[in-house]
Amino acid sequence: MYYAATHDETETIVLGEKVGKMLRPGDFVALYGDLGSGKTRFAQGVALGMGVGTSTRVTSPTYTIMNEYSGAFPLYHFDLYRLGGDSDVTELGFEEYFSGQGICLVEWAERLVSELPDEFLKISFCHEGGEGRTILFEGFGDRYLELLRMLFRGGVGSFD
Amino acid sequence: MKGVFCTPLVFKYMLLLTIESSCDETAAAVVKDGRIILSNIIASQVSIHAEYGGVVPEIASRKHLEAITFIIEEALQKASVTLAEIEGIAVTHGPGLAGALLVGVSTAKAIAYARNLPLIGVHHIEGHLFASFLERPVSFPFIALVVSGGHTHLYKVGGFGEYEILGQTLDDAAGEAFDKVAKLMGLPYPGGAEIDRLAPLGDPRSIKLPRPLLRDGSFNFSFSGLKTSVLTYLQKNPVAGNDSMLHNLCASFQEAVSEVLVTKTAAALRKTGIKRLVVAGGVACNSGLRREMNRMALKEGVELNIPSPLLCADNAAMIAVPGNYYLEKGLKEGLELDARASWPLDTVSATLKRLG
C-alpha cells in the first residue's frame, strides 16, 4: 500500500492529474471515502491528466450517477452514492461500461461488491482536519501494482 | 380568375400528452396549447427513497416502468380527455440516466405509433426554463437560474432553442449540497426541504460559512467547499441533541447558498442589461432563496418569475411548453428517437436544425 498526503484541494487535483496521465483503456479506478473527502476533486485531476479540455466542467455525478467525458480515451465518471447495492448496478447496465474500452472512475465504490472487477486500483480518501487529506493507494492485479510502482517511484508517502 | 381564399383566423391549439422520466419522477400531463394545464400527474417516490437516506435510481428505474401506464391513464382521466383527442406527444429524451429516460421515450414512441401522432423530444432543462410560462408567459430575452439536485446553471434565453450558458457549478449542484449537508447534520431525507423547514428557527449570521467564488467576476458556482466547511464545523461542534445549534447551522448554510445564487444572478442581469428573470428547478422551492430573489428583483427593478412549487420540481407539464412550440412549427421526431444521456443544453439548436 502506498499513501500520499495532500494539504489542499489543488494538491489533490494535481495528484489526480498524475494518475490520469498513467491510465489506459479498460482501467478501473475505485474511489472510497466520506462526504467531502476529495473524491470529486481527485476525479477532476484525473480528467485533466487524461486530456479532457479545461473548458469542460467535470462536476459531481451524484444526481446524474454517471457523467461521460472524452479525453485521450472515454472517461466514465460514476458516483454510486445514491445507489443501494450490486443489483442496482446490474439493472442500470453499468457492467457494460465496467468491461469496456473506456476508463471507469467510480466514486462511492463501497456500493460495489460482486460487481467490482478482479483487478482494479483502489484509492481511499481520509480527512486529516481542515483541507488536509491522506490518500491511500492499493493495486489489485499486476497492471495496477506496476502503475503504483511508477507513480511512487520517488518513495512511499511522496509523489513527484 | 384565381380564387382568393379568405381563411378565417383560426387559433390553432394542440392538445398534448407529455411524459417525463429523466430522473426520479415518473410524470405525465395533458396540456392545451402549451399553456393550459388540464392535468399534471407526478408519481412522487420520496416515501420509497426515504428508507435509503437518498434517492435510489435502481428503484426509480423499475418504478418508472411500473408506474408509467397508470400515470398516463390518470393524466388523461383527470384531464377528461381520451387518447383519441390527443394531437401530439412530447417526451423528455435527455439528459439523464439512459434506463430511466428509455421508459418515457419508449412509451411515447409506442403511443405515437399506435395513434399516428406527431412526436417531439424535449431537453429536460428546457422544460424547467419554460415551466413558469404555464402561469405567465415571459418575454424574450430573459436570464434563467436553474437550480436542482443535478444543476446549478445560469442561462441567457433568447427564444425557444436559443440558450447560452453564462455560468455553472464547478463541482456540486446547489440541491446536492443541501441534501449532503443535511445528511452530515443527520437530518432525514429529503434533506433540502428539512433544512428549509428548520432555517427560520435559527440565526443566519451565527455561524460564519464561506461564500465560494462570490467575487471572482465569473458566473460560476462552487458548493463543494461549503459542504466541507459544514463538515469541519460539525467535527468541532457536534449538533446532535442541540437544537438551537442545528437551527443556526441550517439558517447559516441556507443563507450562504442563497447569497451566492442571488449575487451571481444579479451580476448576470446587470452585465447583460436584461430585466427579466426566471428561477426554476427543485431548489427554487426553497423559501429562503425565493425571499432573497424577490428582494433582489425589487431592488434591481427586475421582473421575477418563479413557478409555483409543483412546477419547480420535475414534472411533465413543463415539457409541453417547448414541445407544443416545436410541434406547431412542424418539427417532429421519427420512431428512431432515442434517449440522450448526455446532452448539453446549448446544443439543442443543432438538434432543432436537424429536424428542419
Image (spheres, coloured by chain):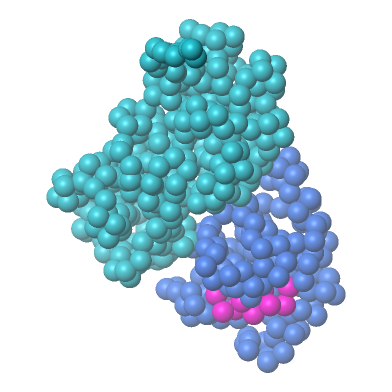
The answer to whether A35 is drawn above or below residue B70 in the figure is below
Q: Nearer the viewer, residue B90 or A47?
A: B90
Q: Is residue A91 magenta?
A: no
The reply, left or right, for residue B62 in relation to residue B7 is right
Above or below, B140 relative to A144: above
Judge by depth and name the residue closer to the eye, B55 or B27. B27
The answer to whether residue B337 shows anywhere in this view is yes
Q: Quadrant of the C terminus of chain B?
A: top right
Farthest-out residue, left: B299
Would residue A14 be counted in the magenta stretch? yes
Q: Is residue B249 left or right of residue A59?
A: left
Give the percent coordinates (x, y) of residue B125. 48, 42
Q: Residue at x 50, y 51 (%)?
A: B346
Coordinates of residue B320 in the picture (x, y in percent): 48, 28
Q: Which chain is blue in the picture? A: A
Does residue B173 lie above or below B50 as drawn?
A: below
Which quarter of the figure has residue B8?
Answer: top left
Colour of chain B, in one word, is cyan
Q: Which residue reaches farthest front?
A: B1
Which SS type dominates the magenta stretch? helix
- Where are the magenta residues, as a range? A13-23
- Residue B140 appears left or right of A147: left
Q: Identify the residue at image location x=51%, y=21%.
A: B16
Residue drawn at the location 72% of the way across and 77% of the way down: A22
| Nearer to the camera, B246 or B25 | B25
The picture quadrant where one finds residue A91 is top right
Percent of width and height locating residue B331: 57, 32
Q: Decide if residue B3 is on the left or right side of residue A145.
A: left
Residue A35 in picture, x, y percent from top left? 51, 59
Q: Residue at x 29, y 57 (%)?
A: B272
